[in-house]
Image: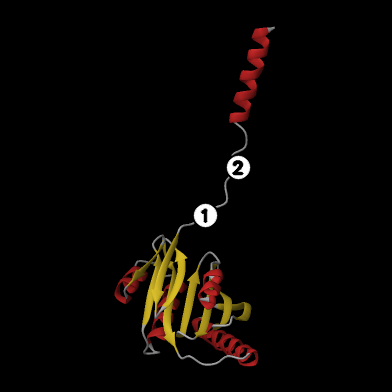
Amino acid sequence: MRKILLLSIAVLLVSCSQGPNISKPFKYSKNTIKFQNNTITLTSSYVKTSRDEFVTELDSLDETSKFKKIALDELKKVESKNVDYEIFVDENNIENYVFIYVCDFYLLSEHRAAKVVSAMSRQLERESSRQDVRYKRIHGRFFFTPDSKVVKLKYLKAYKSQRKFQTEYIVASKKGGIGLLISNLNDIDFESSIKRLASN
């Protein structure tokens, strides 16, 4: 009887140890960056890079990648503003990147914010047509805090089986105006970080 009891306990222990592997919620470490007296949090895989390094890394992509040319177009668009900017790239995938740049500070009412979102969307639709990619607006919104006003436009650009999620922010705060362009394959837009920035 004692042997049967011990054998039953052993079987129970083995079966428990071989139970389903339940994955824990994914937690990522963070990378806090400062730009024009503003603090923004990205995931730790994002590192600051230079313009030349960014272009060199893009050159390593397949020539048939439609988004290689789009990334270069976006870089030129930021450079054409003639303002300070910084580039952060995902070390694991050059196609995930963030441009942060200085933009004019201006007061945003709800009415004006809605007009800005609408104008940005129309401009991107025309731009996508020139780039020969499909454009789909996911959402446009704005959120205000006592210290900042933020306009957000999130959209998808697609070409055949390729697609990219992109998000543009305009942050108007007492510390000045900044703009962000976030391009990502995985639908990451860092909205929670932008909201924290707007609340500081």
Please tell me which residue is depicted at 47% across the width and 82% down the height of the picture: 179
Tell me if I can see residue 159 in this picture: no
The residue sitting at 60% across, 24% down in the picture is: 14
In the image, 134 versus 100, the foreground residue is 100
Write down the residue under mark 2.
Answer: 22
Question: Do the CB atoms of the residues marked 2 and 1 lie less than 8 Å apart?
Answer: no
Label 1 neighbour load within 10 Å: few <14, some 14-19, many 20+: few
Where is residue 125 shown, x and y percent of the image?
Answer: 57, 85
Q: Is residue 24 above or below residue 165?
A: above
Q: Position of residue 199 (x, y in %)?
A: 54, 76
Instruction: Mark 2 or mark 1: name the one nearer the start of the chain.
Output: 2
Question: Separation of disc 2 and disc 1 at Cα?
Answer: 15 Å
- Mark 1 element type: loop
Q: Which mark is residue 27?
A: 1
Residue at x 46%, y 83% (from the top left corner): 178
Residue 154: image tag = none
Q: Amino acid at mark 1?
A: Lys
Say which amino acid is labelled 2: Ile
> x, y (%) of residue 92?
41, 60
Q: Is residue 84 left or right of residue 179?
A: left
Would you identify the image quadrant in which residue 87 lies?
bottom left
